[in-house]
Amino acid sequence: MDFPFDIHILFPDRVSVLDHTLVAGRRSAGRPDLQAHIATVIDELGKASAKAQQLAAPITSASKLQAQRHQVFLLKDAESGGGRGVIVGFLKVGYKKLFLLDRHGVHVEAEPLCVLDFYVAENLQRHGYGLELFQFVLQHKNLQPVQMAYDRPSPKFLSFLEKHFCLTDSVPQVNNFVVFDGFFLSRTAAQLRKVPPKKAGRRDQALLTDGERSVLPGAEGPPLALRSSSLPPAAGILPLLPQQDGAAGHAHLLSRQQQGPEPSVASDPALQSKTHQVRGGGAWSHGSPEAEGAGPGATAHLRPRGRGL
């Protein structure tokens, strides 16, 4: 992505790390003019990512970054753009407090680093930039891919994670975040706290209704992101009750029969769809790294119509 100003002045390093200060290197500190250019770069990247993911509005912008405790890792190509440099893409991460389900259907509370947006310019994909950027973040945070959560990753991003990091089996969740088998094993008991199902359900509902991502009207719905899991989506979210035996269990059964059958509750198709869909489209995750290994005709983002590259 090209800009009408010198990228090297704004971003001296090949990969720059930006936070709420919008400062990349000493030169831009205390320089409102340079910070305005940095804000322009972030805004344009956010718009490109949203367009690739068919989102109604960008989820990454300078104003959002200033208001949130997130980080944007920005990759540049110093040799392109007639010597001024070009922006290749970005990856946004942040810590989120999540209520998750482990493989046994137990609700746990965790605050992992989450991939929130990932984008590589369409004309610069399939050159290894997405992998370079993703690996830089892993080294910077001293993490493995399985230790992170992914905000509605796109099919392209999922293919990227499978090809380069052998992440294939996801654990079904009732929110838009995807975690893989091994996520819970990589954390200590102090990092994972069991929570009552009712509290977790309220939190999950808030994540579903208050999320930043909304798809444009008429856009094709993203495919299921949790298709690789072996657990049934519905059964995985219900806690298992211990079986009752003896006279007490028999009396309980008779009491239930005398009361008559419980009224059935119709499921909400809209909520089910929103719960299990992941983003598709150009950006990798929630943006996504380049889609190396993705099928022909795949768009630029790694994030699912969700976050992409």
Image (cartoon, rainbow, N blue to C red):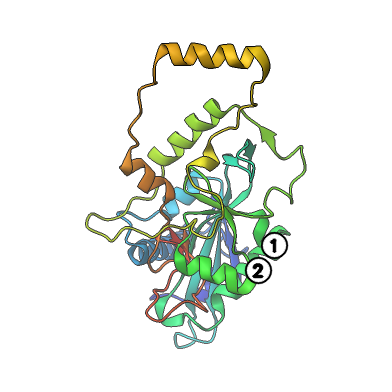
Question: Measured from the top left, where is residue 78 in percent x and y?
Answer: 55, 82
Find residue 238 and report its horizontal and vertical position in percent: 53, 35
Which residue does the image show at 41% across and 44% down from the upper left? 211
Please tell me which residue lies in front, 122 or 11: 122
Q: Position of residue 132 (x, y in %)?
A: 61, 75
Amino acid, disc 2: Phe
- Asked whether residue 296 is in view, the answer is yes
Q: Residue at x 36, y 48 (%)?
A: 273
The residue at which mark 1 appears reads as: 140
Mark 2 is surrounded, within 10 Å at the Cα level, by few (under 14), some (14 to 19) or many (20 or more) other residues, namely some
Q: Amino acid at mark 1?
A: His
Position of residue 6 relative to residue 236, above or below, is below
Instruction: Specify the quadrant of the image occupied by residue 218.
Output: bottom left
Q: How many marks?
A: 2
CB atoms of marks 1 and 2 within 8 Å:
yes
How crowded pointer 1 is (Cα within 10 Å; few <14, some 14-19, many 20+) is rated as: few
Q: Nearer the viewer, residue 190 or 71?
A: 190
Q: Quadrant of residue 2?
A: bottom left
Seen in the image, is 86 located left or right of residue 169? left
* Pick the front one: 62 or 170: 170
Q: Where is residue 29? Give x, y as percent.
A: 58, 58
Q: Residue at x 47, y 48 (%)?
A: 176
The quadrant holding residue 244 is top right
The answer to whether residue 13 is seen in the rendering is no
Measuring 66% from the left and 58% from the top, which residue is drawn there? 146
- Give the answer, above or below, for where 247 lies relative to 173: above
Image side of residue 72 versus residue 190, left or right: left
Q: Quadrant of the N terminus?
A: bottom left
Cα separation, mark 1 vs mark 2, equals 6 Å
**Is label 2 in a helix, a strand or a loop?**
helix
> In the rendering, which numbered label is found on residue 136?
2
